[in-house]
Amino acid sequence: MTIINKIANEIGISTLLKSNSDVYIITILRMLRFFGFTSISLVLAIFLKEDGYNEKFIGYLMSLTFFGDLITSFLISLIADKIGRKFTYILSSIIMISTGLSFIYFHEHTLIIFFVSFIGIITPHGGEVGPFRSVEESIIADLCKYEERSDIYAWGSFLSNLSSAIGSYSIGILINYMELKYNINKIDAYLMGFWVYILVAIIMAILSMFLSNKIEIQKHDQETSETSETSPLITSREQPSITTTKTQSFWSKLIPNLSGESASAIVIKLTLLFALDAFASSIISFSWQSYYIQKKFNITTEDLGGVFFITMIITAITALLSTSFSKRLGPVVTMVCTHLPSSITLGLIPAPKSFKITIFLLIIRALTQQMDVAPKKVFMTTVIKPSQRTAILGWVNVVKTLAQLAGPSITGVLTSYELQWVCFVIAGSLKSVYDLGIWVSFLQYNRHNEH
C-alpha cells in the first residue's frame, strides 16, 4: 500500500483525487474542449481545400482566426473577473456553438466564413483558443496550493491530450465510415466534425452551470500571505489611489499594471519568448501538419486520425511525468530539457520519404512535446500576483496569439509553391532558440532547492 501511495503521490493522482468539485469540472471541461477542437482541426485545411479554396486562402483564413482570437480572448479575459468566470465559460460555449453552425450552413460563402472565423472560436492548431486558458489558469491557481499546481496542470495536460487523441481517431473513423457506408461526398463527411464540435459545446455550456462561486475572484486575494518560497515575484509596491484609478487612460486599462523594473522585465521577457514559440507553432499548426502528411503520403482520413491518435496518446502519457520532473528539477529546467529535443526533431520531419520513418519521428517528438506545459503554468502562476493573474495571463496569451497571425499565411503561400517542408525546418529552429532563451533568461528563477 505504501508503494501504491508513493506512486500516486509521484504522478500527482492523489492530488487530483483530493481536489474539490470545481477542479473536477474544470478538468472535464478542458477534456471536452480539446476533443471538440481536434474534431475540427484534423480536417480543417483538407476540408477547405476540398471545398474549392486554395492554399493561400486557407492560410489567410487561419491567420484571421488567430486575429479574431486575439481580440475576443483579450477583451473577455479583461472583464472575466467582473462578469464572472462561470458566465465566461457559458458565454464562450455559446460562441462555439454559433461558430460550428455557421461553418455547416455557410461554408460556401466566403465573406461569412471570414466573418465567423474572426468573431468565433475555432482552432487550426487543435490547441487552446478563446478566453478559456487565462481564466482556467487563474481558477486553478486560486483553488490549489503552490505544491499542488504542478499535479493539477500535469493531469489537465494529460487528460486534454488524451481527449485530443480520442477526438482525432474518432473523427477520422466517423468521416471514413460516413463516406463508405452512406456514400456521401467528402465535404458532407468532413462537416461531421463540426456537428461533433457543436454537441461538445452544448455539453460544456450545461456543465459550466454546475461551477460554484468559489471559482470567482475573492476580495481577500488582494492580500499577499504566501511564504517567500511561493510568493509571487510580480507584486505591487503601492496601492493605487482612487484618483489614479479614475484617471487611467484607455491603454493603461488595456495593458496590465506592473510595478517595479523586475516585474516588467519578467513579463516582457516571457511575452517575447512565448511569442517566438507561438509563431513557430503557427507555421506548423495541427491542421497544416495533417494536410502535409495526407498530401505527401495520400492516406485515408481514418489512417490520418490513427497517426495522430498514437502521437497524442504518447504525448498524454509522457506529460504526466512532467510533474515529477518539475518537483525535482524545478519548472524552468523541466521546461527546457523536455522541450528542446522535440524542437530539434520537428525540423527533421520532412526529411524521410518513408511514411513509417515519418511516423517514427512524430513519435519521437511526441515523447517530450508537452512535458513543458505543466511546469510552464506553475512558473507563470507563481510569479504573478493572484489579483493580476487573469489580466496578465490574458495579456501573455494575447501576445502569443498576435505572434501567430502571420504564420498560417506564410505556410499557405509556401504550400502553394510546394515548399511546405520549409515550415518544419523554420519552426524547429525557432523553437530551439526559444528553449535556449528560457534557459538563459529564467534559470535564476527556477524553484528547485539545491541540496
Image (cartoon, rainbow, N blue to C red):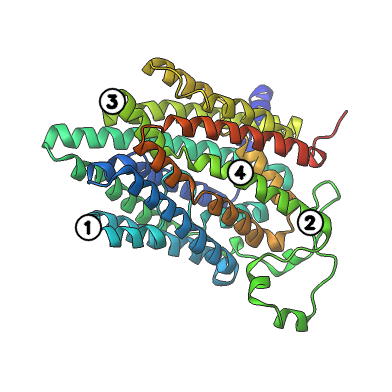
Measured from the top left, where is residue 404 in percent x and y? Answer: 51, 49
Point out the tag, 1 or 3, that comes first from the N-terminus. Answer: 1
Q: Secondary structure at mark 2?
A: helix
User: Residue under circle 3?
Assistant: 299
Q: Secondary structure at mark 3?
A: loop
Mark 3 burial class by Cα count in 10 Å: few <14, some 14-19, many 20+:
few
Residue at x-position 34% and y-position 31%: 305
C-alpha separation, residue under disc 2 versus residue under disc 1: 48 Å
C-alpha separation, residue under disc 1 versus residue under disc 3: 28 Å
Q: Which mark is residue 276?
A: 4
Q: Amino acid at mark 4?
A: Leu
Proximity of marks 3 and 4: CB atoms separated by less than 8 Å:
no
Q: Secondary structure at mark 1?
A: helix
Mark 4 burial class by Cα count in 10 Å: few <14, some 14-19, many 20+:
many
Q: Amino acid at mark 3?
A: Ile
Q: Nearer the viewer, residue 28 or 411?
A: 411
